Amino acid sequence: MKELLMFIITFTVVYLVYLIAVILRKNNKSKLEDSVEFRWLEKMYKINIKKVNLKTLNQIIALSNSFIIAITFTLVNFIKIFLFKMLVGFVILIILELLIYHIIGKYFKHKEEGK
């Protein structure tokens, strides 16, 4: 129960910070289109970012980044040894990023082809 609460709090805090710092900033549209996430989706999955609803994609990226960080933080807290925490955290982070962004890329590619 404690771990679930930690996950929910971490997820909420990271999402709110991302929402305020990145999404809700004015004149931020061009910076968002140049972000690593957008470029990754554009190059790896051949998604035309100009045709995608940017608000939807920004929200999905914010939710996925929050989920990745919260899961990694929660799982790493089970480990006692600091060096092992860092190693496992890095591995979990990379795996989750690749997996989640693969799902997002496939979703938007499928959505783009369906139109």
Image (cartoon, grey):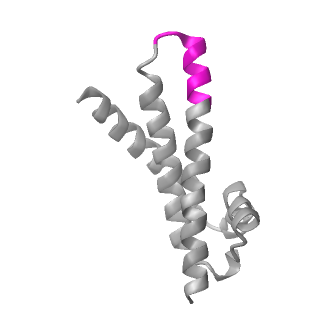
Residue 84 in the magenta stretch? The answer is yes
Q: Quadrant of residue 39?
A: bottom right
Relative height, residue 114 to residue 40 (above, below): below
Q: Quadrant of residue 87?
A: top right
Residue 32 in the magenta stretch? The answer is no
- The reply to whether residue 24 is in sight is no
The range drawn in magenta is 80-90
Relative height, residue 55 to residue 32 (above, below): below
**Residue that sits furthest to the bottom in the current view:** 115
Relative height, residue 101 to residue 70 (above, below): below
Residue 99's x, y, as percent? 56, 50
Name the one closer to the observer, 23 or 83. 83
Name the one closer to the observer, 6 or 25. 6
Q: Quadrant of the C terminus?
A: bottom right
Name the one closer to the observer, 109 or 19. 109
Residue 105's x, y, as percent? 61, 65
**Residue that sits furthest to the left in the current view:** 1
- The reply to whether residue 74 is in sight is yes
Residue 32's x, y, as percent? 67, 63
Report the predominant secondary structure element of the magenta stretch. Answer: helix
Which residue is at a point 69% across and 73% down the rendered structure image? 47
Which residue is at a point 61% across and 66% down the rendered structure image? 26
Which residue is at a point 53% across and 49% down the rendered structure image? 65
Q: Is residue 33 left or right of residue 12?
A: right
Which residue is at a point 41% across and 20% down the rendered structure image? 78
Q: Is residue 13 left or right of residue 38?
A: left
Relative height, residue 104 to residue 4 (above, below): below
Q: Quadrant of the N terminus?
A: top left
